[in-house]
Structures are given as C-alpha cells and as structure tokens.
Amino acid sequence: MDFALSILAGFGVLLKPTVFAYMVGGFLIGTFFGAVPGLTATLAIALLLPITFSLDVETSLVMCAAIFMSGMYAGSITATTINIPGAPSSMMTSLEGYPLMKKGEGASALGHAALGSMVGGTLGAVFLILFTPLAAKLALLIQTPGKFSLVLFALIVIAISHRGLIAKSVVTTAVGVMVATVGIDVMQPVARFVFDSPALVEGIGLMPVVIGTFAVSELLIQAQDVRSARTVDQNNVAKLPIRRRDFVPTREQLREIGAWTYIKSTIIGFMIGVLPGAGGSMAAFVSYAEAMRKSKRPELFGKGSREGIAAAEAANNSMCGGAFVPMLMFGIPGDPTTAIVLGVLVINGLQPGPRLLARQLDLIAPMFASLLISALILIPLTLWLLGPYFVKIVSIRKALLYSSIAVIALVGTYVATFSPFQMVLSLVFGVLAFFLRVNNYPTVTLLLGFILGPDLESYLRRTLSLNHGDPTVFLTNLDSLFFLLLTLVFFYLMVIKKPKVTEATET
C-alpha cells in the first residue's frame, strides 16, 4: 500500500512545472541524441552527469528516464530514413524500415516504430512498477556470500554476452576492476596503487571514466572516419512525406500485426532487460526472430515488414523497464545506459538495494513515473507534433556537432569535480577506450567492471573475514551456491551450447 502511494506521489511530482519541463527537455534531448548516427542516449546521460550536481535527485532521475526512453525509440528515425541506425538497438528496424522508405512509405514505418515503442515502453514501465516490490523482498534474503556470487555472476554474464569477443570482454572487465582498486582500500584506511601521487589517493572518479569512455572515445572514433564528418545526403530525407496523417498506422496494418506480437515482444524485451549486460540490441533481435518465426507472412521480412518493426521496437523499449530492476535492487546495471543512471544515483548519495525502496522510494518514484509518461507521449509528441521535423536532425553538420560535444564533455568534467587532474583523466580514458574500440574490445565491460569491482572485492573480503578465510562458505551458503550454479548454466547456454539466434547473428 505504501509503495502504491509513493508511486502515485511520484506522478504528482511530475505535475510541478519545473520537473515537467525537465522531463520534456530530457525527452527532446534523448530524441536528438538517439536520432543522430554516432550519438546515443547513453552519451546524452553521460554528458548530463555533471549537470546533476546542480539539480535535485528527483529532477535528475526524471530527466534520465525520459532520455532513456526517447533515445531508444529515436534510433529508428535514421534507421528508417537513411539506413543508419541511430542506436545499435535499431539495427533490426533498419532491415524493415529502409525498404519501406524506398517504397515511399517511410512515414508509415516511423509511425509503426513509434507505436511499438509506446506499447513496449509503457508495458515495460508497468512491469517495473509491479515487480519491483517483489524483487526488493527477494533481495533482502540474499546474504553477503550470495551478494559476492551475484556480482560475479553479473560480471561473467556481461563478459560472455559479447559473442565472439569473450576473451576481450574478460580483459576489459578486469581492467575496469583494476582501475577501481586505485585509492583508499575498501576495508582499511590505507592508500594503494597511488604510485606516490597525492592526486590518486582519492581514487579515480566515476565522472572521468564515464565521460572518457563514452564521450571522448566516441568523438575520436567519429574523427577517425572522414565520412562521418560529412553532412548526410538530404535527398533521402526530403523524400519522406511531411503529412502527419501518413504517420498514423491503419486498422488493416494493426490487424495484420496483431496484439499478441506487441505483448509477446514486450515480455521478451523486459525479461532480457533484467539480464545484466543484455541490452536493447539483444532484445530487439530475439523478438524480431520470434516474430519472423511465428509470422503468417515471413516472406515480407527483410523487404519491409511492419510486423518486424513492431516486434523490434516494442522489445527494445520494454527493455528499459527491465534494465532498471537489477540496477535498483543490486546495483548491477542491466545495460550501458542504466550504468550511467547508476552513476547519477551514486553521485547523489543513493545506494542501490532493497533499502533504497524502503527508505527513499519518494526520490526514485518520479523516475518510474517519467519512464511511463515518456513512453505514453511517444505517439502524440513524435508523430502528430514533431515527427515530420525529427527526420531533419540528420542534416546537421557533424563537424559543428561533435566539436560542441567535445567542449561540453571536458568542461562538464571540470565543473563536476573542479579538478584539472580528473579532467586530464577523462582524456586518458578517452584515448584508452578509443584504442580498445579500434581493436574491437568492448568498452562497456570496462565501465561495468569499474562500477561493480568495489562491491565484488568488498563482499569477497567481508565473507572471508567472517569465516576465518574459509572459501568453502561460497559453496555451503545456499544463496551463493544458487548464483554460482546459475553462472554455470548461463555459461553452458551462451558459450558451450550456442543458441541458433547467436549463430544467425555471427553469420
């Protein structure tokens, strides 16, 4: 009862003009970053991170949720108009949206993408609200050995989820954990790995790691590719009809897709979102493959199937709600974007876990509300009000855009920390992440290793300390044994016995 009242109060917070303005602003920012190729909602929230110091925690989380939801949809704009997914999760949408674009039905494709995103995002947010109390009760039952095994499970699943790059994922995860050990020891007031540098005694902050890994490295990647600096051919954009009624799906098209496609894709997306590190790309692909398998007209897939668009978009937006569950309950991000949102929580002094819901639910309830409202306004705001103009985003000059982002990233790091050393660190991590990405090393695992590393070490050392150094406690404790066995199951299913979906992706 208290949980329901707190959620209702969260909706009430959105009625404040200032908070509502930030939510709408976040929605528009997420749409912009999601639509521009090379930019993502993750980057938008990373750049927002320094601003959170000047905002209250409720407003910051409301804005993050709006960016997350709109950015996930906005990737379908360029995926449809110019066959360049604005976000990795929109790859499957480009397979169906661009063929429709070439047929002169680009507006219809964008309309179905928005509808699928709205349905998936709305139901995903509802599932989040409904299942969070249950997840909190289960989280309270997990003891310290179980928490170590849970974090270990998350790191291993995140690493092996990168198909064909498992060894490289392990390396970047280990690097992230190692970087997190710099500074004061988690158990004793002793500095370690500081190399006689007073600046390193306070440790390496989350801000330079986030800004460097996501913003600086992305700018270097874009600068490396000369083609990315040119203006997108506006002829493709100009072909898109501007009439608003063309964006509205017809009854015949909705009947052909079927309500079950939306519901099934939403459930798949939400469940995949709960898995650490899975992300919107996996959710979209699995739902797309399932829709094609069950479709009455599978021959249309790859040639302009609206059913494929609906399945992919419903799944990747419902993933948003699912990704918040492990982040809020265990401090384990479900995808890269929630990893940045976790940083917003930490910066504002909020510790993820069941006690967060018990004691500070009033601070995160507006975020739940924002996630739901942002999904609901996708149709009216995207299609009927601004939809015809969103596609013009792709014509912005990249040189001007990326240079502005570079200034915002570096200045934001300094303003957040008032430390030139931390600003230099953001450049160092940016260059490091750039070389990792050039050599096909996943950088998100570095960030997640950095975030989860202190918890992994703390739970390990506390468990061994309480049990006189006996490591068998991880096998005799039922919580720990469960997560260790779950790790073996996932390793078998994802590495030893590769699913058909994975094989199709690799080919």
Image (cartoon, rainbow, N blue to C red):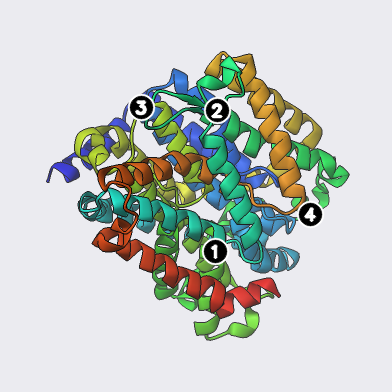
Measure the C-alpha gap from mark 2 to mark 1. 31 Å
Tell me whether circle 1 and circle 3 mark residues in contact (CB < 8 Å): no
In the rendered view, tell whether residue 416 sits above or below residue 477: above
Q: Residue at label 2?
A: 204
Q: Earlier in the sequence, mark 1 or mark 3?
A: 1
Q: Earlier in the sequence, mark 3 or mark 2?
A: 2
In the rendered view, tell whether residue 138 sits above or below residue 419: below
Tell me whether circle 4 and circle 1 mark residues in contact (CB < 8 Å): no
Q: Tag on residue 282?
A: 1
Q: What percent of the width, then of the height, locates residue 442? A: 64, 52
Measure the C-alpha gap from mark 4 to mark 1. 29 Å
Q: Residue at label 3?
A: 349
Closest to the camera, between mark 3 and mark 2, is 2
Measure the C-alpha gap from mark 3 to mark 2. 17 Å
- Residue furthest to the right: 226
Instruction: Give, as a three-letter code, the residue at label 2.
Output: Ile
Q: How many discs appear?
A: 4
Q: Earlier in the sequence, mark 3 or mark 4?
A: 4
Closest to the camera, between mark 2 and mark 1, is 2
